[in-house]
Amino acid sequence: MRLIASIIAIILISSSAFADMKIILLGTGTPFADPEKSGPATAVIINDKAWIVDAGPGVVRRASAAHIAGEKALTQPNLSRVLITHLHSDHTLGLPDIMYSPWTLNRVDPVQIWGPTGIKEMVNGIETAYAVDLQMRLEGAEPANATGWKTVVNESTGGIIFNDDNVTIEAIPVCHGDWELAFGYKFTHNNKAVVISGDTTYCPALEAAAKNADILVHEAYDGAALKKRKPEWQNYHSKAHTSAKDVGKLATNAGVKSVVLYHQLPFSGSKQAMLKQIGSTYTGPITWGDDLMVIDVE
């Protein structure tokens, strides 16, 4: 029922809004296997062109649900621009799906992939794993175009990774535990800015990049509930993820206009507890993100 409600919501919002920049939360989940939350994936749509940040499990089918609900930018042939924040499996298990499924559904353009150092090796490994599938589709009886399976991979260590008359995209090195390089991403369009945190603990570089942003999409965990977990998990999460209270602190320091929570980790706590924690350090609008939620950037 929740998924049906989300699809109805996206239909209502899409049919009534004509913003030239919007966010669609394709997946807001974590490694916890919540059947109502797909893995992390966020579509930033600017003038009907979709950029997908992260490729968690279920990303292609969530994009299809959004398309069915009326978002034409997320038709299968349009799924050709992907930005990976880091190489954790919960953020990349859907990458083979994006690389191949839209191709079998009439994507002609090669898929462009941006990410940190190591993304080329990952993509090369995926291509090796699916070499037999590729050969059968290209050389067998099944109709297939000769270009939509190809990839253009762009590795980065941070900074502006894309810029045209429509959008500037910046990769922001963030603080995700033992990862040497992990990114958040900032999208700037017509003096409007959206920042997506990726996985990170409280990070000064992200705070600086989010200065006066219209929307900050940020991960969060329940700080009180974390204290009830085993010490090794407390150690890990405190170094790799951000407490709801610290999300609010960062948003306040940056002067962010609105916060959207995704990749939420309530543990034994609750949505209400996390909203209260972030509200103790941030007084602006806070949205609890669910799969297929649409947020206009106005």
Image: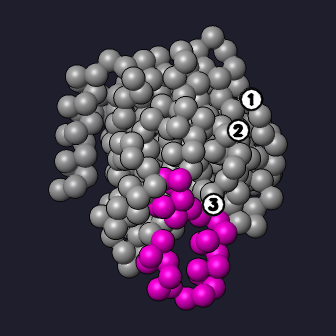
Kind of residue at badge 1: Ile
Residue 95: x and y, percent? 60, 49
Kind of residue at badge 3: Thr
The color scheme shown is one colour
Q: Secondary structure at mark 2?
A: strand
Task: Look at the numbered discs 1 and 2 and tell me whether their residues touch, using CB distance below 8 Å.
Answer: yes
What number of labels is visible?
Answer: 3
Q: Secondary structure at mark 3?
A: loop
Which region shows up in magenta?
Answer: 223-249
Viewer-nearest residue: 136 or 200: 200
Determine which residue is flagged by label 3: 201
Determine which residue is flagged by label 2: 171
Q: Residues within 10 Å of mark 2 (few under 14, many from 20)?
A: many
Residue 129: x and y, percent? 70, 56
Q: Is residue 94 above or below residue 141?
A: below
Work out whether mark 1 precedes mark 2 in sequence or the reverse, and give the earlier one.
Answer: 1
